[in-house]
Amino acid sequence: MTDLLLQYRAPGVAWIVLNRPDRHNAFDDHLIADLTAMIETVEADKTIHTIILTGNGPSFSAGADLGWMKRAAQASLEANMADAEALARLLHTLNAATKTTIALVQGAAFGGGVGLIACCDIAIGSADTKFALSEVRLGLIPAAISPFVIAAIGSRAARRYFQTAETFGSDEALRIGLLHEVVPAGELENRADALLAALDKTAPMARKDAKQLIHDVAGKPIDGELAAFTAGRIASIRAGDEAREGLAAFFAKRPANWISGGSKK
């Protein structure tokens, strides 16, 4: 049985499924390398506009595989550095993907599993999901995932959960910003279908550019330089083919040509 599945269930949508249900989709060095390569493959596919990341079985991901961690404890500093750099590369690859990324989260999401969620644009969790940033229980720290988790939940929440390693539920994950939405158990895929229907109405290149805009603007001082940058971005977008088509479709009261069944003018 392969540890990862790549499925194309609808045009333009790639499902990446963690497939180690007997280990609660915990990851080791091999899964990290394979998942990075799979995301890179999908990222390079111009026919794909959305990536959905989920897990088979009772859990989304329990984080690091304990057998792998046991081996790491006996390994050299150089070997541990290589492992850490590989995990950092995976997280960066997912975070920097130009496609819209959606995490569908069920069961348990611990440690590095929380990092994967934080790297996705949209995170939907089942009501019965449990979360933990559990590294300090093992004498470790959540170093590789920290930039992405802190960006998602803020430094204030991170200061608590990085210290206590408490388990918390979906409602708390929603409150602190790790999840965008909580749905009843068994409803994750139905909610994904609704999100895909909403995304179908949006312009693919505009989505890509809007995502890059967040990376470019977040954390920057709101000053003249930023104002000039954002003015330049909207001016260039307005002159593009998608904007012309979107505005023409709006005024003609017809679907834009990127919408399923829309005009191909």
Image (cartoon, rainbow, N blue to C red):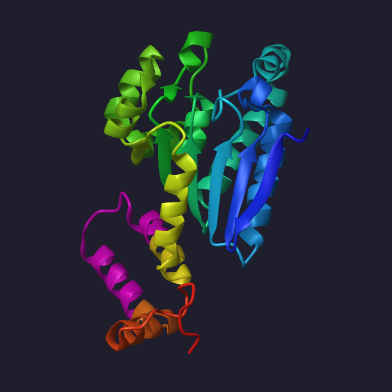
Task: Look at the image and say whether residue 28 sits in the magenta stretch.
Answer: no
Q: Is residue 207 visible?
A: yes
Q: Is residue 154 visible?
A: no
Specify the principal SS of the magenta part: helix
Q: Is residue 194 left or right of residue 89?
A: left
**Considering depth in this image, is 239 or 130 the residue closer to the camera?**
130
x, y percent for residue 205: 47, 70
The residue at the point 36 percent across, 56 percent down is 214
Task: Look at the image and say whether residue 217 sits in the magenta stretch.
Answer: yes
Q: Is residue 211 left or right of residue 5?
A: left
The residue at the point 70 percent across, 47 percent down is 37
Q: Is residue 251 left or right of residue 13?
A: left
**Considering depth in this image, is 238 or 8 the residue closer to the camera?**
8
x, y percent for residue 192: 46, 48
Q: Is residue 146 left or right of residue 2?
A: left
Q: Quadrant of residue 256?
A: bottom left
Bounds of the magenta segment: 211-235
Query: Which image quadrant: the N terminus?
Result: top right
x, y percent for residue 174: 31, 33
Examine the rendered structure and indicate whether residue 3 appears above or below residue 213: above
